[in-house]
Image: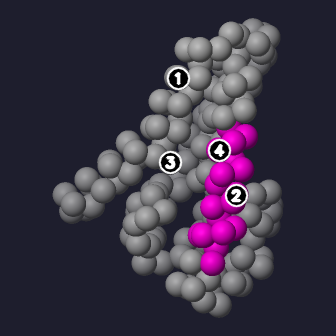
Amino acid sequence: MKTKTIFRHVRDIIFLPLSVLILVPLVIYRHTPDIIPDYLSIKLFSGLMFLFGAVLFCWTVVLFQSVAEGTLAPWTDKKKLVVIGPYAHCRNPMIAGVVLILISESLWFRSMPILLWASVFFVINTCFFIIREEPFLEKKFGDQYRNYKRNVPRWIPKMHAKN
């Protein structure tokens, strides 16, 4: 991987996921009381959810680099449409992973405002996908994307991939 490509990946990871997953929740957490009960079962569930979300997120970042030859940022060009791995079951698994991490943070830190942030983040991304990303991908990838969109749901994963 070229130095310029590595720089773009690091830049985009610092700018997007770290701000969404660390900076915003930290600001929210520092100014809110603990509301969610502090049960061991909630902590364990939160840890499993975090792990699943992190694996999903990292897997999709690797696919964006190796298959699409781009970064996770929506403003970087992707050469190919990614339709394998988690993308065979859900059109937005990267954001699903981020939302799972945010929900796990809200449970771990017992913070309803972080849960609200996860909801706001989800709605913002859903609107962005419908208004901007999906029309762009249809224009760029044509029938390949239209077929993918017809067969793969935006959020709720299908257990059996059909492309």
Q: Residues within 10 Å of mark 1 (few under 14, many from 20)?
A: few
Q: Quarter-wise, where is residue 77 in the image?
A: bottom left
Q: Residues within 10 Å of mark 2 (few under 14, many from 20)?
A: some
Query: Which mark, residue 77?
Result: none
Query: Which mark, residue 121?
Result: 4
Q: CA distance from mark 1 to mark 3?
A: 24 Å
Residue in the foreground of this view, choosing between 56 and 101: 101
Q: Does the image show residue 89? A: no
SS assignment at label 1:
helix
Label 1 with label 2: CB-CB less than 8 Å: no
Magenta region includes residue 127: yes
Q: Quarter-wise, where is residue 18 in the image?
A: top left
Residue 69: image location, x then y, percent: 39, 70
Q: Quarter-wise, where is residue 52 in the image?
A: top right
Q: Which residue is mark 1?
A: 27
Q: Nearer the viewer, mark 1 or mark 3?
A: 1
